[in-house]
Structure formats: C-alpha cells, structure tokens
Amino acid sequence: MQQPLQQFGDLIEPAPVPFSFHTPGWYVTEVVFILLLLMGAYLFARYRRRNRYRRYALLWLGERMITLHAQQEYMQQVYEADMLMKRIAMKVYGREEVAGLRGNEWVTFLNQRNRRRDQFSAEEGQLLAETLYSHSKTVDKTETDRFISKTNNWIRYHKNAPGNRI
C-alpha cells in the first residue's frame, strides 16, 4: 500500500515573486513617509515657537539669580522670580485674571496651573506676603533656593491657556 502523500506525486511550486522598489505600493509608502516627516517637522517647529518664552524666561532667571546670589540679595531674588512668574501669567492667562492676585490667591493660582507635583506651599505664600508686601521678614539662602527651584519648575511645566497663541 502506498503512503497517502506519494499518491499525489511531486508538489508544483510557483516561481518566486520578484522583489522591486519600483512598484506602486512603495511609491505610496514613500509619499506617506515624507508627509509624516513634514508634519512632524511642522509640529516640532510650532511647539518650539510657542514655548520660546519659556526658554528665554528660564535663561533670564538663571543669569539673574546667579548675579543676585553672588551679592547675597535673597529678598531681591524672591521678588524678581515672583515678578517673572507674574509677567508670564499675565501674558499667558490674561491681565484681567492675574493682575489682582496676591498672597494665597496668587499661590493657589500658580498651583492650579502647574502640571507637576512640585507645588508652592502656604509657607511660600506667606513668604511672598511678608517679603514683597510688608518687608517684615528676611529671607535665608535655603528658602530662596527652594522658591527659585519651584519658580523654575513652574515656568517649565505650567499649563497653556486654552487658545493661547504665544
């Protein structure tokens, strides 16, 4: 008795399909790839342009804080960092919403627009009130460094206002 596979004879294999990059599918793939690259470049350029103010603010903050830190002007550092955040917030969220905020309202506003967990505390709100508005407290280096670090993080990670076209 013959084996079942031997009853059918040899298998007939088709000729191999030739491979070429000159087929319509590859042309479509190239066009889609080029369009995706162009779209990615456009989105990256738009992102960089919209966040240019953040880079400039961080650069200014770093340079200014180094100068004031060397002069041990800690209260001035806190003041200028706060004013920088205020200017950014007025530009991004509008003067009407930001200009009148002070003390705890200002700290709450900053925390609500922060995407990070490194938020300003009630102590920093008190620090702002005592140093900026009443000048009744001296500020030490560690408080200043912590406040500048949080300012730096807020500038980097604050939320954009809806429809913001900076």
Image (spheres, rainbow, N blue to C red):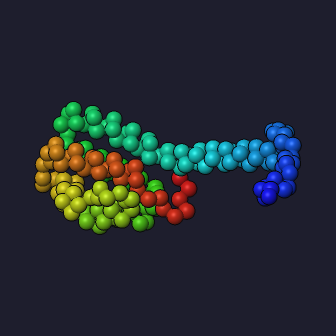
Q: Residue 156: percent from the left, percent from the top?
A: 40, 49
Task: Identify the residue at horizontal 29%, vertical 58% (top origin).
Answer: 119
Front-lying residue, 99 or 153: 153
Q: Is residue 85 left or right of residue 18?
A: left
Residue toward you, 95 or 23: 23
Nearest to the observer: residue 27 or residue 38: 27
- The vertical placement of 69 against 155, above or below, is above
Tell me the residue at 83%/42% (across/down).
Answer: 16
Q: Residue furthest front?
A: 1
Placement of the N terminus among the 4 image quadrants: bottom right
Residue in view at x 67 percent, y 44 percent: 37
Across and down, in percent, residue 142 comes to 16, 45
Looking at the image, residue 132 sits to the left or right of residue 160; the answer is: left
Up the image or down, 51 lies above or below 111; here it is above
Quarter of the image for residue 57 reads top left
Q: Quadrant of residue 101?
A: bottom left
Residue 122 shows up from this direction? yes
Question: Could one spot residue 125 in this view of the protein?
Answer: no
Q: Is residue 19 above or below residue 126?
A: above
The percent position of residue 127, horizontal first and vertical second, equals: 19, 56
Residue 163 on image: x %, y %: 55, 62
